Amino acid sequence: MRTSFCYFAIVIPLLLSIAFLVSCTPYKSQQVSFRPPGDYENVHFIAGAKVAAESYADEDKARESFGFNIRKAGLLPVQVVINNTGEDTLQVVPGQTFLIDEEGNYWNLLDKKEAYTRLQKSDEYSRLAKGSGKGAVLGGVGGAIVGSAIGILTGQNIGETAGKGAAVGGAGGAVIGGAQTYEDKEPERRIARDLEEKDLENKQVEPGILGRGFLFFPGEAPSASRLRLQLQDVESGKLHNMVLNL
């Protein structure tokens, strides 16, 4: 009996320590490499530009590229590369750009705010936030952090957004997880900045520019077979449609 007690006295703290270390795995910013459109088999030529796309539906590939399991967090990323050798400035039309799965179902593109909200509510985000707890950042000071992050992604005034976030968090009650400072939320801010830098939605690709970025679709999509992409000539408003095999 004493032997069993000693065994559990040693093993249980060890297991708890391992669980703690796993849950507190720090977030690490990742740079994602890419190739020029001409190197992809699905390259399209349109409006004087070469356009190609690459899916990150595979969890291992997505984790390696983003520094965490973004698929588990409810997002399916697709990287688009545009080499604009034409004379027109091009821009993605979000409302007419869709992911097509292997069954032929179409999935809408997520806007920046929705993509970040999905991530913020996920268990994967909670793990990256040093165990503060899923949804904990909605309380008190955490509300200001979420407000700031969404402000970064949506282009709003960060100070105003943070203030609104703090107000919402204050109305929701005390800070969950104890005395957490603004500095404690560095993983959240880094994730927000990384998503903003990688996001392609509404970014203009001017003539002579090699542009690239990610489009984020719902993680509920079981697969990524094709990308129905619509680009618009910013000056004339002319629309260009293409379907890229993934």
Image (tube, rainbow, N blue to C red):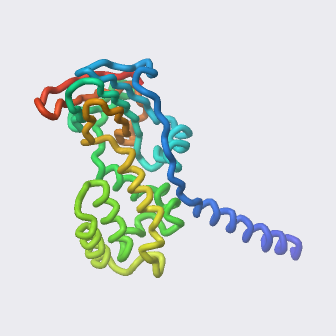
Residue 185, horizontal then vertical, whole percent? 45, 68
Image quarter (top left, top right, bottom left or bottom right) of the C terminus = top left
Query: Residue furthest toward the front?
Result: 208
Residue 40, horizontal then vertical, whole percent? 44, 22
Q: Is residue 53 left or right of residue 178?
A: left
Q: Does 244 sit above or below residue 60?
A: above
Q: How many marks?
A: 0
Image quarter (top left, top right, bottom left or bottom right) of the N terminus = bottom right
- Residue at 43 percent of width and 56 percent of height: 191
- Residue at 23 percent of width and 23 percent of height: 241
Q: Is residue 125 left or right of residue 164?
A: right
Residue 20, horizontal then vertical, whole percent? 63, 66
The image quadrant of residue 163 is: bottom left
**Of 122 and 39, the residue lying toward us:** 39
Query: Residue furthest toward the left?
Result: 236
Residue 224, horizontal then vertical, whole percent? 41, 30
**Of 112 and 47, the residue lying toward us:** 47
**Of 15 and 234, the residue lying toward us:** 234
Q: Does 150 sit above or below residue 83?
A: below
The image quadrant of residue 10 is: bottom right
**Of 208 and 27, the residue lying toward us:** 208
- Residue at 88 percent of width and 72 percent of height: 3
